[in-house]
């Protein structure tokens, strides 16, 4: 096979794929996709606006929620251009540099989502198991440092895989199986030994998909132990109810993430439609569902949204 590297004089580009078998219906399929992106952008922007305006929400729990909303917003905006231009205008080509840029932000925000959920689990642990020390442990300075650590962690996790992939020659085939650039998809087109990339990817799986959920489970094990130790059934219910939104957010992220990893590794010969559906569920579920969950389940956010709407209607 002819191998192509990024040093070639001819511009190298990848070819994106829409919904296999439904190409004539792309314009109609774009309607639900457009609605999902609008819900995601409006929902996360609204949560950010409410947290910023309401001084009573300038607390650790809601500062972490604002980090989650920013991450979800970034995740949605990263895939929106290529997905919608493909469905609306059938623009399938993406340049080498643009594809790697999307690859960086796509996986970076995905890993950031996992890191923020881990930080939120720690927040719930301190709030329930160490309530008297909550304000002194999670100060604004500490939360700021956690946010910076999350950004550094994600950048350092994604950059090596980006450079490891960019140095390799790509085959003559440039056809990707999604409407955005995923690492698992791009590495299939490489005409070289990818063992180093595979081992690094395996390390990232252990670090993100295994370690983060494991630490979240440990935190909830400690929370459950603390809650069951209280005598009041009302306090037990209140404590567990405060964690419900976070638990749902964790499931919405990790269930599709694990499913997509399994499909790419063990079901490579599955119909292309299966891969496309799994990837879209993985990328769109958190940005769309998280603002809905926190708006419905969190009383303070819900009241803040009502006040924001009433303020907008006021003359």
Image (cartoon, rainbow, N blue to C red):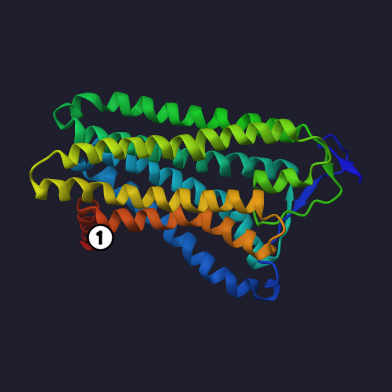
Q: Position of residue 12 (x, y in %)?
A: 81, 45
Horizontal side of residue 174 vs 315, given as left or right: right
Residue 63 in view, yes or no? no
Q: Residues within 10 Å of mark 1 (few under 14, many from 20)?
A: few
The answer to whether 17 is drawn above or below residue 214 in the figure is below
| Secondary structure of residue under mark 1 | helix
- The quadrant in which residue 108 appears is top right
Q: Which residue is mark 1?
A: 309
Identify the residue at image location x=47%, y=48%.
254
- Please give the count of numbered marks on the rendered protein: 1
- Give percent across and percent down for residue 269: 72, 58
Q: Residue at x 59, y 32 (%)?
A: 203
The one nearer the camera, 133 or 234, is: 234
Is residue 170 shown left or right of residue 74? right
Q: Is residue 108 visible?
A: yes
Q: Check the image and name the residue furthest to the left.
A: 232
Quick one: which residue is furthest to the right in this view?
2
Q: Nearer the viewer, residue 187 or 89?
A: 187
Residue 84: name its quadrant. Answer: bottom right
| Residue 308 pos. (x, y %) | 24, 55
Where 202 falls versus 251 (above or below)? above
Quadrant containing the C terminus in the rendered view: bottom left
The structure residue drawn at horizontal position 49% and vertical position 27%, both measured from the top left corner, is 152
Image x and y of residue 261, in percent: 59, 48
């Amino acid at each position: 096979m002819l191998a192509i590297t990024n040093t070639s004089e001819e511009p190298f580009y990848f070819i994106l794929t829409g919904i296999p078998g439904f190409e004539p219906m792309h314009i109609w399929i774009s309607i639900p996709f457009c609605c999902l992106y609008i819900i995601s952008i409006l929902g996360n922007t609204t949560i950010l606006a409410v947290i910023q305006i309401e001084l009573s929400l300038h607390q650790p729990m809601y500062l972490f929620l604002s980090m989650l909303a920013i991450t979800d917003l970034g995740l949605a905006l990263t895939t929106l251009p290529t997905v919608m231009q493909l469905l609306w205008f059938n623009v399938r080509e993406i340049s080498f540099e643009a594809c790697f840029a999307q690859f960086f932000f796509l996986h970076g925000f995905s890993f950031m989502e996992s890191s923020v959920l881990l930080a939120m689990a720690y927040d719930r642990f301190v709030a329930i198991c160490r309530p008297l020390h909550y304000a002194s442990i999670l100060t604004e300075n500490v939360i700021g440092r956690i946010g910076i650590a999350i950004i550094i962690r994600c950048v350092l996790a994604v950059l090596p895989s980006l450079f490891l992939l960019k140095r390799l020659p790509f085959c003559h085939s440039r056809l990707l199986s999604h409407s955005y650039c995923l690492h698992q998809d791009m590495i299939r087109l490489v005409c070289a030994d990818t063992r180093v990339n595979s081992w690094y990817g395996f390390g990232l799986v252990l670090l993100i998909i295994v370690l983060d959920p494991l630490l979240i489970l440990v935190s909830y094990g400690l929370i459950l132990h603390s809650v069951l130790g209280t005598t009041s059934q009302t306090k037990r219910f209140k404590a567990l109810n405060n964690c419900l939104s976070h638990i749902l957010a964790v499931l919405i992220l990790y269930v599709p993430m694990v499913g997509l990893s399994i499909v790419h590794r063990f079901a490579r010969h599955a119909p292309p439609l299966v891969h496309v559906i799994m990837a879209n569920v993985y990328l769109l579920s958190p940005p769309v569902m998280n603002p809905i969950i926190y708006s419905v389940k969190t009383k303070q956010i819900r009241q803040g949204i009502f006040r924001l709407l009433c303020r907008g209607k006021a003359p």
